Amino acid sequence: MSIKLKLLTSTLALAMAGSMFTAARAEELWDPYLRGVFEGVPAGALPPPGVYGELDNYYAAYSDYGPTGNKIPGTHLNVLVEVPIVLWVPGIKVLGATYAAAIAQPFDYNSYEPLQNTHGGGGNLGIYNTILIPGMLSWSLPQHFFVRAGVSIYLNDATNTMADLVDGKLSNGGVPSGNGYSTIQPDLGFSWLDNGWNVSVGTHYAFPVGSTTTTNYNYRSAPEFSADYTVTKTIGAWTMGVGAEQEDQFSKDTFNGQPKSGSIARNYGVGPIVGYQLHNGVDVTAVWNHSFATASDVGGNFFDIRLTTAF
């Protein structure tokens, strides 16, 4: 399954004395894509009928990068994201494909250096937008190929949003926990699975529905394409390989109705994947990625420890 969430990419600048802030560049806040969080997962296939649980323990240490790819000093971002997921595969067929549905409720803790310098505080803990996947369909094709299509819906129900920061209601040294609008994200994945090999590509295109609007502030994020790449080999209880991720934005955001300069984000990262199947039926997968090309975005290193099991 494909649950994605992207991290803060805007540098916030003090606009006037008090608590009014405005986005200085790049995207406003969170995008649904959480980089590489499902590297190692067969993007085109589904497991056998049943109910499955997953918990991603995701930590990122990033800094802002400008439109030309230069790292911006004093913009360090620490983020811990916990992503509990329930996947239901009822064993029914739709259009010749296996049907499944899922729900996830991420929550995050983050601290952002510019806000710590101006507000103090250790950081912000809150609930991200609830993620619903009402349907995904996986087709088994000849020669061990699989294709999966679905749609992810991100609800406008986060604990706090960019409007809270702009209005001075958030002053704990962290950025808001989620977006103040909904998002619709079509997902399409492809896998080749044979003799322990998993060669997969998962693609996603996120469409924000609505914008952040408050006094003298209206910010609308543009759609964005993202993808995960996986090449792994399983031998016995061990799985090893490599994963990669990409994010590409093809149009500018708008701020108060005008195209936002320097807001076309891109990021590319790569790193190893190691997995082990425990005797109690729990699979443990560790993923590390390092960003090697970033512009108008945050870049650095992320680590994810994924636990999966069947209920």
Image (spheres, rainbow, N blue to C red):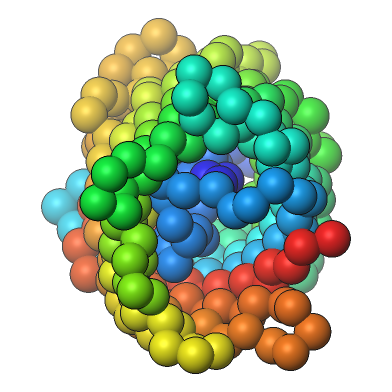
**Along the horizontal axis of the image, is 132 left or right of 2?**
right
Query: Which image quadrant is residue 184 in?
Result: top right
**Along the horizontal axis of the image, is 44 left or right of 309?**
left
Of residue 130 and residue 236, the one placed in the foreground of this image is 236
Q: Residue at x 48, y 36 (%)?
A: 138
Q: Quadrant of the image for the C terminus? A: bottom right
Q: Position of residue 299 (x, y in %)?
A: 36, 64
Residue extending farthest to the left is 68
- Evaluate whether residue 73 shows in this view: no
Of residue 190 and residue 253, the one placed in the foreground of this image is 190
Of residue 245 and residue 302, the one placed in the foreground of this image is 245
Question: Residue 244, relative to residue 131: is it above or below?
Answer: below
Q: Residue at x 25, y 24 (%)?
A: 251
Q: Position of residue 46 (x, y in %)?
A: 55, 48
Query: Which image quadrant is residue 140 in?
Result: top left
Of residue 8 and residue 234, the one placed in the foreground of this image is 234
Question: Residue 194, relative to residue 143: is it above or below?
Answer: below
**Along the horizontal axis of the image, is 256 left or right of 211?**
left
Q: Position of residue 161 (x, y in %)?
A: 70, 35
Q: Position of residue 225 (x, y in %)?
A: 32, 35
Question: Residue 223, relative to residue 288: is it above or below?
Answer: above
Question: Residue 151, relative to residue 44: is it above or below?
Answer: above
Tag count:
0
**Along the horizontal axis of the image, is 121 left or right of 223?**
right
